[in-house]
């Protein structure tokens, strides 16, 4: 339980970040149903896109926090759906990497667009200076995340 | 692609929120390994705790964005692990609701503590006034989320 003012601030920021991010994520999710894609599949796509085409299944499994076998199943489904594919490393043939396919990229763009549209509607209700304050505060936070 | 300054701001805020929340979540996750709990199980616990002991499996499945059968499997695992349990509705015996058990609550507390500890270390590097700016900005955003 928080005791100092510092701890209270951390407590509240963690909670707000969690609720805000969950709500925005949830509102971009409606579109996943249209694409017939589950949230775990989408999360896998998003991680793959971050290091496309370098990510190995081991890294993907660590990023998703899922067992290797569960991750392999997800990758099988991504391949079957034509969203991503396995790729042999050119230097070391034993290493398998993951490449996003065009349709996978489209799915990501559509979902992020839906999130942005929802967030845009929310931010319309926040005045200009407060919107800039939010942007500035998040930039500061991200800069520090990169360094811890 | 963003065209106006407004759209650019929304674009960047969505991206920052996503990266920040993902990083904080990932850093609280190390502890899940100690509890031998997967991220989907933890997410289920977190949702159940929000409406404890009112949430039905249908609602949980909608919140998680997972199929009903997948959600049933998750609930089976939560019960087997003694983290949550099914509960017959007292008024309508056909309705099954979910109740968090003490060990489930402990898991949530430990994981959120780990996230707060990580976030606390990050926020130590942000000066006091900027920390308050972040808090204020997130409060404003959440207030608007509730209304859209």
Image (tube, coloured by chain):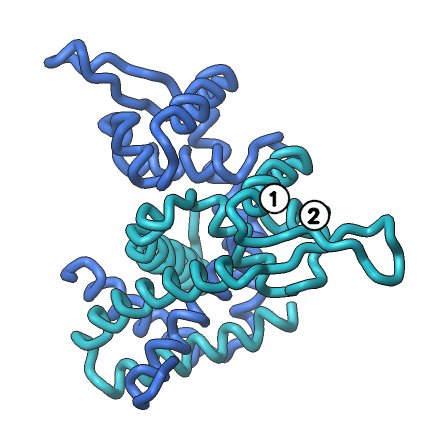
Chain colours: A cyan, B blue
Depth check, front residue: B104 or A1: B104
- Asked whether residue B101 appears in the rendered view, the answer is no
Neighbour tally class for label 2: few under 14, some 14-19, many 20 plus, Cα within 10 Å: many
Neighbour tally class for label 1: few under 14, some 14-19, many 20 plus, Cα within 10 Å: many
Query: Does A15 sit above or below residue A127?
Result: above
Where does residue B65 sit, x and y in percent of width and height?
35, 41
Chain letter of disc 1 in the image: A
Q: Are marks 2 and 1 in contact (CB under 8 Å)?
A: yes
Question: In the figure, residue B144 lies in which quadrant?
Answer: bottom left
- Asked whether residue A71 appears in the rendered view, the answer is yes
Where does residue A138 sit, x and y in percent of width and height?
43, 75
Specify whether A125 is left or right of B3. left
The residues bearing labels 2 and 1 have C-alpha atoms spaced at a distance of 8 Å
Mark 2 or 1: the one toward you: 1
Instruction: Name the residue rendered at 44%, 71% in the picture.
Output: B15
Depth check, front residue: A148 or A100: A100
Query: Does B100 sit above or below residue B19?
Result: above
Instruction: Name the residue rendered at 35%, 69% in the picture.
Output: B135
Q: Does dot 1 land on a helix, a strand or a loop?
A: helix
**Considering only order in the chain, which callout, 1 or 2, is on the residue closer to the N terminus?**
2
The circle on residue A24 is none
Where does residue A110 sit, x and y in percent of width and height?
37, 63
In this figure, which residue is indicated by the disc labeled 1?
A75
In this figure, which residue is indicated by the disc labeled 2?
A57
């Amino acid at each position: 339980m928080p005791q100092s003012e510092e701890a209270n601030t951390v407590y509240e920021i963690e909670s707000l970040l969690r609720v805000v991010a969950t709500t925005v994520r949830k509102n971009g999710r409606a579109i996943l149903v249209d694409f017939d894609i589950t949230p775990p599949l989408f999360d896998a796509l998003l991680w793959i896109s971050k290091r496309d085409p370098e990510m190995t299944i081991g890294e993907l499994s660590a990023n998703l926090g899922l067992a290797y076998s569960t991750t392999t199943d997800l990758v099988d489904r991504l391949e079957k759906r034509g969203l991503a594919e396995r790729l042999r490393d050119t230097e070391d043939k034993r290493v398998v990497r993951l490449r996003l396919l065009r349709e996978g990229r489209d799915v990501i763009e559509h979902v992020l667009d839906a999130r942005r549209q929802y967030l845009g509607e929310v931010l319309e209700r926040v005045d200009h200076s407060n919107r800039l304050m939010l942007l500035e505060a998040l930039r500061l936070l991200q800069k520090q995340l990169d360094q811890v």
